[in-house]
Image: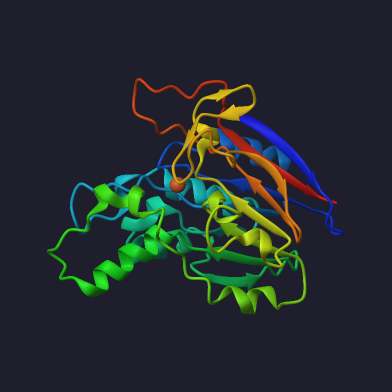
Amino acid sequence: MKERIYRIRAGIPHTIALLSDLHGKDGRDALEILRRRRPSLIAVTGDLFLGYKTKEGDDLADLQPAVLPFIRGCAELAPTYISLGNHEWTASPADYQALKSAGAVLLDNEWARDQETGLLMGGLTSAMVMDYRRFRRKHAPDIPYPDDKRHIDGLILHPSTRWLRAFEEQEGYKILLCHHPEYWSLRTPMLKDHPIDLVLSGHAHGGQIRLFGRGLYSPGQGILPRYTGGVFRGPHGSLVISRGLSNTAPRPIPRLFNPREVVMIDLH
Ligand SMILES: [Fe+2]
């Protein structure tokens, strides 16, 4: 597990830990880094779970028991905010409640002002989660969601952004947790054009295999993706992408030259 540090000029002195894509795995090595570094705030940008259920009615938190202790460990160290990634599409209301009971603030297309730091925290929910919710509203519970087409459909789906305007109008330093880095400048809502100081993302897993400083593949961006990790500047603010806490690719695809990572962002 690598600890990666980025410095971003912000006019305020806080350290933000960016964690993403735990995918139900053991997060104890990440917690070890957090305990040593003591961030002022922890941002978890989705895909805490692996979004596959054995049957309807199961809660992901029960199927993947490493997730809640990880969130509890984060919340004991610093205020912890979570946004929802594409893999949270099967998360149940009980899963959401369990994350909150573990001490985190769940930002599901909403924002909140952090009491300790004064930072404004927003969470944009993955369009794939929104699509699943729409499908469930329209179809009877026994009709299965066509999740095999999920990643293809994902390219034309849109997240719900109406709430963003009120968030953007607030006074103060604004941080948006948004699982998908492609929302920055490859597809709507084109977050780089929004007055948001810092957008935090994950999802791309560093491009899985990194060669010559570039990732090879990312869902939502395809081959040789542009946004797989690091810092990108826009006209209003910056995007920081985590390469993720876990490896999920099925064997024999390795995660090469691309260590799992905890990202620390020093605002200065
Ligand atoms: Fe993802």
Location of the N terminus (image quadrant)? top right
* Whether residue 118 is situated above or below residue 218 in the rendered picture: below
Say if residue 1 shows up in the picture.
Answer: no
Circle count: 0
* In-front residue for pair 102/127: 127
* In-front residue for pair 95/238: 238
Q: Is residue 23 left or right of residue 121?
A: left
Colouring: rainbow
Residue drawn 51% across the image and 40% down it: 204
Residue drawn 70% across the image and 57% down it: 198
* Whether residue 257 is situated above or below residue 110 in the rendered picture: above
* Whether residue 194 is situated above or below residue 226 in the rendered picture: below
Residue 121 lies in what quarter of the image? bottom right
Residue 173 x %, y % = 76, 66
Residue 222 x %, y % = 46, 39
Q: Is residue 88 left or right of residue 120?
A: left
Residue 159 x %, y % = 46, 65
Q: Is residue 158 left or right of residue 16?
A: left
Say if residue 102 shows up in the picture.
Answer: yes
Residue drawn 51% across the image and 59% down it: 83
